[in-house]
Amino acid sequence: MTQITETALAPLVLKRLGREEAVREHGVRGAVGTATRRSRAAVAYLSNVYPKISHSFIQTEIAALERQGIEVHRFTVRRAGEGAADATERAEAARTTGLLEDRGALAKAVLGCLATRPVAALRALGLAWRTGGSGNRIRACAYFAEAALLARRLEAEGVSHLHAHFGTNPAMVARLVARLAPVTYSFTAHGPDEFDAPRGLDLPGKIAEAAFVIGVSSFGRGQLMRWSRPDHWSRIHVVHCAPDPAFFASIEDGVQEPVVTPQLLCVARLSAQKGLPLLLEAVARVAARREIRLDVIGGGEDEAIIEAQIERLGLRGIVTLRGWASPETIREALRASRALVLPSFAEGLPVVLMEAMALGRPVIATAIAGIPELVDGDVGWLVPSGSIEALEGALDEALDAWPEELAAMGMEARARVLERHDPERCAGRMVDLLKPLAR
């Protein structure tokens, strides 16, 4: 099918469509509402890019929901550019419907909305137009088209509730769907993007119209409360994300031997937001007086800048950029590392911290957002954001720690993640929220 971008979609949305096609679409609409009943509760999930390696927690959540009796229909705005990591991810991609993949289906969906429910369609388009901002009219039209297609698909499948991951454009599309079809919606806000531009994203409006809203930490819930009316706070809940069960199952008897080599690992997008330039400066200071090695797994927009900094600081052979990697490769890298380092300036509650801790690895992380709810001195080192000196000190302490100290930290870290971020327990909280809305 033809690939289409959101920018290229706007002329299609606004193009004048013929009367004959409108009549044909109206006929299709009559059959859409006659979906058969299902034997178990069904909901739909929408994400911006799915499946995606860095968003594996969504796949983990969906799998756990299905084990607990919720049928999940997967939708994504667009496909990930990266190839599927393994057979499981390929199968997940095959089960997922991309909204921007079929130009004809988008056109028919827009036409159907305009022809059969013109008032609702124009109001939804107006909402997209108003909340898109003066510089995002094209994007607003794209959101409307995506919502029109998704509304049609949900009605055809007899699905009455849509959950979006991320309070950015997926939540916007979900909000429009609820204007176009008898569908309720909810969304999970991860941060930091939702909290960086809450007014521009109309976060208060999205919360006001949602059946419920999820924060992935207490910090996240507090931010959602900050940008909503007090009479809406009762619909805001905390549901933690969870690592893939493979991170729990890979240690027999809950014991993972500590690593005595000076090998550290960072798993992050190559972006200044993740604090990598600061980490490289701290590593250079430590490397000037002792042995240290750092592997970095991830790719991103600042890769060239980070490579240049590695060269400038003389860190070739000390810091290795390994690019994007599969979950299994990340597990192997964590097993071979003394600790995970994540010096971010902005986060929600990173799943990679949970993955490392589930494998019995201590972590070094910054005291921002929801991270202090998971990390403290019993499981690693929590440092002030933006401080090279504090990060350097934590690296030294991690390298100085005796194997017994690392083992004790690792055992506590694993126990903490098992208690707070077990996939089945987290999914159970979602089931409690979704079941009353599903059919």
Image (cartoon, rainbow, N blue to C red):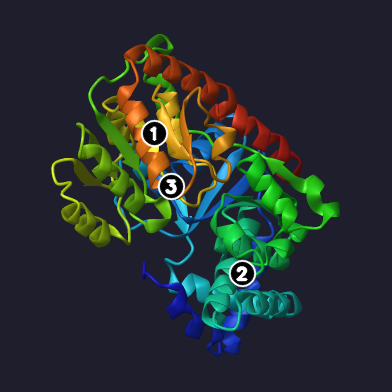
Q: Secondary structure at mark 2?
A: helix
* Mark 3 or mark 2: whose residue is earlier in sequence: 2
Reply above or below: 64 against 119. above
- Which numbered circle lies on residue 387? 3
Q: Residue at x 62, y 40 (%)?
A: 217
Which residue occupies the foreground of this view, 393 or 20?
Answer: 393
- Residue 16 lies in what quarter of the image? bottom right
Residue at which label 1 appears: 394
| Residue at position x 21%, y 32% in the image | 290
User: Quick one: SS at disc 1?
Assistant: helix
Q: Between residues 28 and 403, which one lies in front from this camera angle?
A: 403
Q: Quadrant of the C terminus?
A: top right
Residue 28, disc: 2
Q: Which of the marked residues, 3 or 1, is nearer the chain's N terminus?
A: 3
Amino acid at pointer 1:
Ala
- Locate residue 247: give its quadrant: top left
| Residue found at the very far top of the displayed protein | 253
Residue 210 shows in this picture: no
Gap in angstroms between the C-alphas marked 3 and 2: 60 Å
Q: Amino acid at mark 2?
A: Val
Q: Residues within 10 Å of mark 1 (few under 14, many from 20)?
A: many
